[in-house]
Image (tube, grey):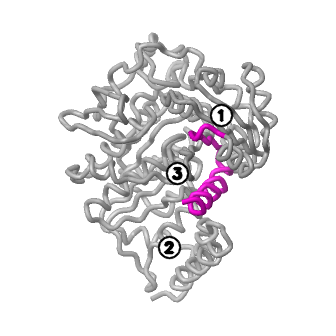
Amino acid sequence: MNIRRLLAVWGARLIKTACQLTGKQGVTLAGKIALSIYPPILKELAGEVKKDIFVVCGTNGKTTTNNLLASMLEGDGYKVVCNRTGSNMLNGVASAFVLAAGLSGHLKADYACIEIDEASTVRVFPHFRPDYMVLTNLFRDQLDRYGEIDITMDLLSRAMKMAPEMKVLVNGDDSLSTYLALENENPHFTFGIGQQVFQEEDTREIREGRFCKRCGEKMEYNFYHYSQLGDYYCPRCGFKRPKLDFDGTNISLADGIAFDVGDFHIKANYRGFYNVYNILAVYGAASLAGVSLENFNKVLGDYTPQFGRNELFQISDTKVMLNLAKNPAGFNQNISAVMTDTAPKDIIILINDNSQDGTDVSWLWDVDFDRLADANAASITVCGIRCQDMRLRLKYVDIPCDLEPDIEKAITEKLHNGVKNLYVLVNYTGLYTTHNILKKMEGRRS
């Protein structure tokens, strides 16, 4: 056994434990230390996965899709490596494998389900070649980090070329994801929602794929689902939504989520139309890999979302829903989910501008916050580093709000004086802190 490999595994475990004792995750640092001690460790451990390696990319839905796929495989009795915390750059990916290894330095795993940041694929793929890539969608996200969406697409295209035998499963309702798959030679498959679900389209919503990537003509749509997702076609060159390999039909959002894929009926107690896509992606990936779907609905029923993804807390007599909202498409879908609850509610919105969030918060002006006027909100409170920007954004749509930069104080106020139904929407760097605050309060008050 290579002594440096052993030291890398042991060192990563030690770092993670030390970080947890100080209240930090430590996942990214553990991976960084492991790669520093023994650079080939990720390649060697990935090579010990017995069956398939799945990677999940895309602007929204990566964590939910990836973790749900891992839970499904585990429900069938398989041992799975998964970066469940959402640490999805090179160091986080390395950490997932290293921390799953035994003290012997070896990995005993049947599958790996790895969420990867789109821009990090070209850094991760030199270490291993995935068997499958799931691409959830491509929306505009953090312009100061990624630049225009064409840059993200170029990076993903380069990654696909690094793994030419990798099967790619893309959201066929997204013209950008579909174009990317068609422009590369990887075997590709599609999932989507072939029928119109909503009769009224919201024409205010920002649509990234409004122009055909092949010829530049403005795209036409038979119908939208949200953002640019829908039944699109180019009137000039004929580029259009492909025939869907995994088509969600008979969609019902009346009591959770229910729909069919062929003869298979799916039922989940989730909120948010976007989760239909997440579930479809998991169904499609498992089907392509030949994994049994016998326990699929049971896994959906037992699945606990990763923190900040429709995560529910019960703090004394107040129900608190925590959700990540980090870009226009994701925020608009979160607003839609909030509005499905017609009861009176308090809403807290936290906006930070740390490097992981993206320091450019101009995206707030692309979110349809005016819809909150019809959300039956008893109060709206804005928090975080850019709370003043958020307050200004709401002022422009004539929605009053309270200002409280400190998220813990804002939550405490609503627990004492709210309507006992609280929604907390946060962007990326506020998520871990807010989750820990709510867990602490839940434990203290239970």
317 vs 224, left or right, is: right
> In this picture, is 245 found above or below 104?
above
Residue 434 visible in the shown view: yes
Q: Which of 340 and 233 is in front in this view?
A: 340
Q: Quadrant of residue 110?
A: bottom left
Q: Mark 2 points at which residue?
A: 98
* Mark 1 residue element: loop
Q: Give the range drawn in magenta.
A: 418-446
> In this picture, is 361 found above or below 304?
above
Q: Position of residue 344 (x, y in %)?
A: 57, 30
364 vs 40, left or right, is: right
Q: In which quarter of the image is the C terminus?
A: bottom right
Q: Name the residue under label 1.
A: 148
Distance from Cα at disc 2 to Cα at disc 1: 34 Å
Of badges 3 and 2, the one in the foreground is 3
Report the magenta stretch's main SS. Answer: helix
Disc 2 residue crowd, few under 14, some 14–19, many 20+, Cα 10 Å: many
Please tell me whether residue 219 belongs to the stretch shown in magenta. Answer: no
Q: Where is residue 216 in the image (x, y as percent from the top left)?
A: 55, 18
Earlier-in-chain disc, 2 versus 1: 2
Q: Where is residue 267 in the image (x, y as percent from the top left)?
A: 29, 39
The label on residue 264 is: none
Q: Name the residue under label 3.
A: 314
User: Which residue type carries mark 2?
Assistant: Val
> In this picture, is 315 found above or below 135?
below
Q: Do the residues labelled 3 and 2 touch (CB within 8 Å)?
A: no
Of badges 2 and 1, the one in the foreground is 2
Q: Do the residues labelled 1 and 3 touch (CB within 8 Å)?
A: no
* Residue farthest along the left direction in this orientation: 263
Earlier-in-chain disc, 1 versus 3: 1
User: Which residue type carries mark 1?
Assistant: Glu
